[in-house]
Amino acid sequence: MNIERMVESGYYWIDDKARRTSLALARKLSRRHFLSKIGMMLAGAAAFPLLPVSRSFAQSSIQEIGDPQSCEYWRYCAMSGSICACCGGSATSCPPGTQPSPISWVGTCLNPVDGRNYLMSYNDCCGKSSCGRCGCHRTERDKPVYYNGTSSTVYWCFGVEDTSYNCTVSLVLGYSDE
């Protein structure tokens, strides 16, 4: 079967439709117009993270009691490492000169104030040598370690420029009313 017969019989109807549409657009639009539209889309995509977004959970909306420099603080129920609140940072922020690792481990901690279980993200702060103060190793609700990567005792300073471990922060990801 030759190509002309295939086109007439509908074998290449998609190709024919695409060709006709692209030719019609080429007659109506200039290259500058096309490039300006692409540029506007790229600029819009770059500005997207700047839009106001309702954060899933605000750290400051949680009622808390206890000493953030103590290993017995409720946020540290599955923590392993030095507490950043003792190293120049806070329970939720890294000390100056360090940066949080994008890799973390999680735990579920009970807040004694409101009785809710909170999903906690533990991020190691990296970039300085170990603080070495306020060491904390709690394993509440910890499971047996089958793979080294699931252990809370591994330093998680991956994905940052300086991989030296300093301390660990505890961030709230969400909660459960159960």
Image: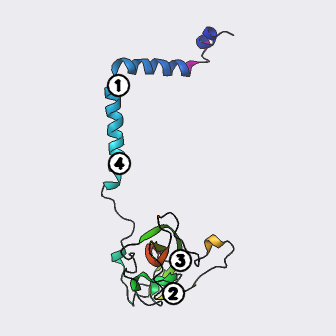
30 or 159: nearer the viewer: 159
Label 4 vs label 3: CA separation? 34 Å
Task: Residue 143 in the image: state x and y as whole percent.
Answer: 64, 79
SS type, badge 2? strand
The kind of residue on which mark 1 rests is: Arg
First in sequence: mark 4 vs mark 2: 4
Task: Residue 65 in the image: state x and y as whole percent.
Answer: 38, 89
Residue 134 is left or right of residue 139, and the answer is left
User: Residue under circle 1?
Assistant: 31
Taking the spot 36% from the left edge, 64% from the top edge, the residue there is: 55
First in sequence: mark 4 vs mark 1: 1
The kind of residue on which mark 2 rests is: Cys
First in sequence: mark 4 vs mark 3: 4
Q: Quadrant of residue 64?
A: bottom left
First in sequence: mark 1 vs mark 3: 1
User: Residue under circle 2?
Assistant: 136
Query: Dot 1, how many residues are within 10 Å of its Cα: few (below 14), some (14-19), or many (20+)?
Result: few
- Magenta span main SS: loop
SS type, badge 4? helix
Query: Dot 3, how many residues are within 10 Å of its Cα: few (below 14), some (14-19), or many (20+)?
Result: many
The kind of residue on which mark 3 rests is: Gly
| Mark 1 touches mark 3? (CB < 8 Å) | no
| Quarter occupied by the N terminus | top right
Q: Nearer the viewer, mark 3 or mark 2?
A: 2
Q: Which residues are magenta?
A: 9-13
Label 1 vs label 3: CA separation? 54 Å
| Mark 1 touches mark 2? (CB < 8 Å) | no
First in sequence: mark 3 vs mark 2: 3
User: Residue under circle 3?
Assistant: 107
User: Residue under circle 4?
Assistant: 46
Queried whether the magenta region covers residue 121, the answer comes back as no
